[in-house]
Image (cartoon, rainbow, N blue to C red):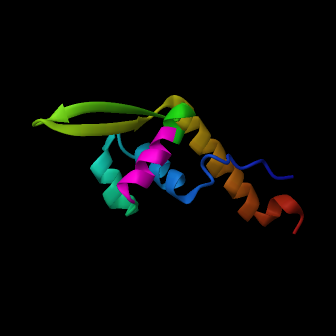
Amino acid sequence: MFDDLDPLLHSQLRLQIISLLISVEKAEFSFLTEQTRATKGNISAQLTKLKDAGYIDVHKSFRNNYPLTTCNITPKGVEAFENYVKAIRQYINTENHGN
């Protein structure tokens, strides 16, 4: 039997964002756009979805009079990512399915 995949993380861009955030303490918006090659509008929309789910925190401030958005993963986000990876492993590990 397969565990359900978290539909929030089963989006390529949201999974990219969470994967980046799991490996760093925090990330700036510009770093996320550079690494994912997504548009600013798409990144912004996906960050809102992840924030609303409690998977990330988004902090808005200023640096040299320019807006600065930074993000970090929350403990809930770490748990969701770990559960997602565990579920994916079930899908690719055929030993669990009698083959």
- Left or right: residue 91 compared with residue 62: right
Examine the image and state in which quarter residue 12 appears: bottom right
Q: Position of residue 49 (x, y in %)?
A: 53, 40
Residue 39 vs residue 18: left or right? left
Residue depicted at x 50% and y 56%: 13
> Which residue appears farthest toward the right when viewing the image?
98
**Residue 29 screen position, x and y as percent:** 32, 46
Q: Is the magenta stretch mostly helix, strand or loop?
A: helix
Instruction: Verify whether residue 47 appears in magenta.
Output: yes
Q: Give the range drawn in magenta.
A: 39-48
Q: Is residue 58 left or right of residue 18?
A: left
Residue in front for this viewpoint, 4 or 34: 34
State the image quarter where residue 99 is shown.
bottom right
Is 70 or 78 nearer to us in this picture?
70
* 71 to the left or right of 56: left
Q: How many labels does the image show?
A: 0
- The location of residue 58, given as percent across then percent down, is 39, 33
- Residue 45 magenta-highlighted: yes
Front in this rendered view, residue 46 or 32: 46
Image height of 3 relative to 38, above or below: above
Q: Name the residue located 68 percent from the left edge and 56 percent from the top edge.
A: 88
- The residue drawn where x is 40% and y is 60% is 38
| In-front residue for pair 50/67 | 67
Q: Furthest-bottom residue in view?
A: 99
